Image (cartoon, grey):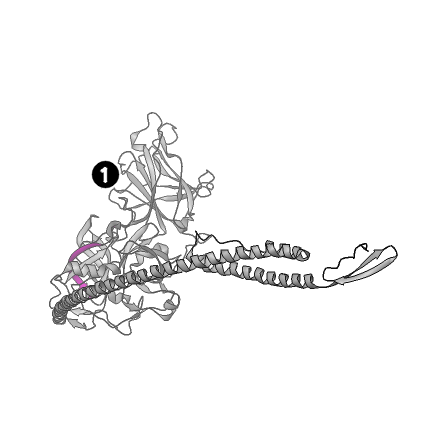
Amino acid sequence: MKRIILTFSLVASVLIGLAPSSVAAATFNVASEADGYNMPGLNSGFDITHISVAIFDNDPDLVSFYIHFKNVPRINQFNDGQGSWTGLLLDFDLDGKEEIELSFEATLKSDLNSISGTAVDIATSKFLSCDVDVFTNIDEDKTWIGFEVSRSCLGIPRVLKVKAYADYIAGDKLNYDFAPDDQFQITFNSSANSGGGTKVTIPKSGSTYALPAALLNTSTEAVNFTQPPNDLTRLTDNLMPAIVTVNCADGSGSGWSARAELSAELKSDGYRSFVVTNHHVIADCLDSKKVSLVLSDKSVIEGTIISWNESNDIAGIATKRLLPTAEWIGTAPKQGWWVGVLGSPLGQAGILTTGIISSIDIPAGTFTLTAPINPGNSGGPIFDATGRVLGLATSKNLTSEGQLAEGFGNAKGVPLLCGALISCSVEPNPWGAKSKFSEADILAKALADKTAADLKAKQEADAKALADKTAADLKAKQDADAKALADKTAADLKAKQEADAKLSVDAQTKCLNYNGDLKSLKFKISIAMTDYPLSKSKFQSLISLFPAEIDCNSIYLSTFDARYNGELRLFQNVANSYDQALKSAKELASKKKTITCVKGKLQKKVTAVNPKCPTGYKKK
């Protein structure tokens, strides 16, 4: 028989009121549908309502199956001498036929103590060597009976089907109940087996990269660490960006970005920040080494588990996002110090609680505190009045009756990080390094900051006055410049309008002269065709080459010169051709010709510009 372990790990998950061999937080929890049918006359003590299954963070290999009854069971209900029986039937190959039976025969304990049950191979009726612990909580009126077994020992696959059975009188076939109506299929987050029933072995401590290195501390020595900070709001505002929520599988915890120098290996792979949390927060993700981190601004990033130590319950996560960091090296804490806790209890991020250090174990690197902590706080920072992280919120104690012991939290101190998560060669003792600053320094700095702020305010006021005067002077100059520019623009516009008017008159004159010259040339060509009939065809061909007249009533100055010059070139070409044609026509008209004239048998040749045969002769 096992007694419950009086420690409550702070992983936020669905906290069911079903206690297995230790009280812990559930990282896996599912329940079947309710039983839909009962045979007539069924004894109500054997009425099963449903099945649930859970895995807890204290041992991911153990799985707890729960048979839920309508009423609270009796301790001797299933060993009453009538063959009364209850148990679970497990179908590993999903073929609808169960291979394993879990049951018990002894008297139940009423106070969470367990009794031994049995695991039987149904096909061979042989008892298996795997331990089965059966427990209930009749003292608190719980209606369930739990069966806890090792997944790896029993060879439980990732997916299986389960059905519960209860029988009032063995063999009477009258008072029994199955639940649920059909087999309940369960899919675990990951398999507990690596084949052949061998449990997957993950080293209890290790690292995948060279460890980050501690940096010289920048902590503050307070006048009295037992007093709360002067401005807690400002202190938490400064710390909050370094706090994250760590999500792994179905559970979540907290973490904080530690001030440390990443190794060259980490940097070369793109990592920029190092987050510290508890080992039990990330235990279910050690296979993949991947978790998700929710930042204070609600954004979600990926984290890679790079170091872990199960015995000290600490782990390190690297991320490629640059996060603000928290100081964690300085004066050794003492009993009675004020402390604050920031984290994500019950999945609610950014929750602050405060208390004091109630006890401290310097050699062990642990302490207890009175500040309230709850599931989800695991791995979150516990800090002093100066904001320096002293340790990680890890667990809280329970009373011997299994009740939560409020104000009795356990913390893993930052000295445990050295060697396991961080190389502390520079600052070998996180709880023994001399603080760099004192409260007097801080007050002096505050005074200096105020003086600087006042000076800055005066400088800003002077600068504003100067800026206002400069702006006024500039505006006056701009107004004067604008008026001068407007006056010049108006003068330029008037000058342009006058120039355009002159250009318009010049264009009109050019246009009229051009059209007149064109008409004159046409007239000359028509006279030449009459005067020189022998060259008429040449003069006619010139008419087809004539450019068009320009409409002098629709002149656009922007295009007139281009058109005028083009038409003028055509006109000049025609005029030149006319001059050549006229010259040729005149030469042709003045050239003497010889003709032959005949009269009977007489012939006579006549040579002249326009030769004609004498009277009585005919042109041959």
Q: Which residue is mark 1?
A: 141
The one nearer the camera, 42 or 50, is 50
Q: Residues within 10 Å of mark 1 (few under 14, many from 20)?
A: few
Q: Residue sitting at 72 percent across and 59 percent down?
A: 610
Q: In the picture provided, is 375 more to the left or to the right than 100?
A: left
Q: Nearer the viewer, residue 125 or 203?
A: 203
- Residue at image x 69%, y 62%? 588
Q: Secondary structure at mark 1?
A: loop
* Residue placed furthest toward the front: 615
Q: Quadrant of the C terminus?
A: bottom right
In the rendered image, residue 356 lying in the magenta stretch gets the answer yes
Q: Which region shows up in magenta? A: 348-361
Residue at far top of view: 40
Main structural element of the magenta stretch: helix, strand or loop?
Answer: strand
Q: Position of residue 303 (x, y in %)?
A: 35, 59
Q: Quadrant of residue 537?
A: bottom right
The answer to whether residue 242 is magenta is no
Numbered marks: total: 1
* Residue 158 horizontal/vertical position (percent): 42, 47
Please name the amino acid that badge 1 sits on. Asp
Q: Please, which residue is most extreme toward the bottom here?
A: 426
Residue 395 visible in the snapshot: yes
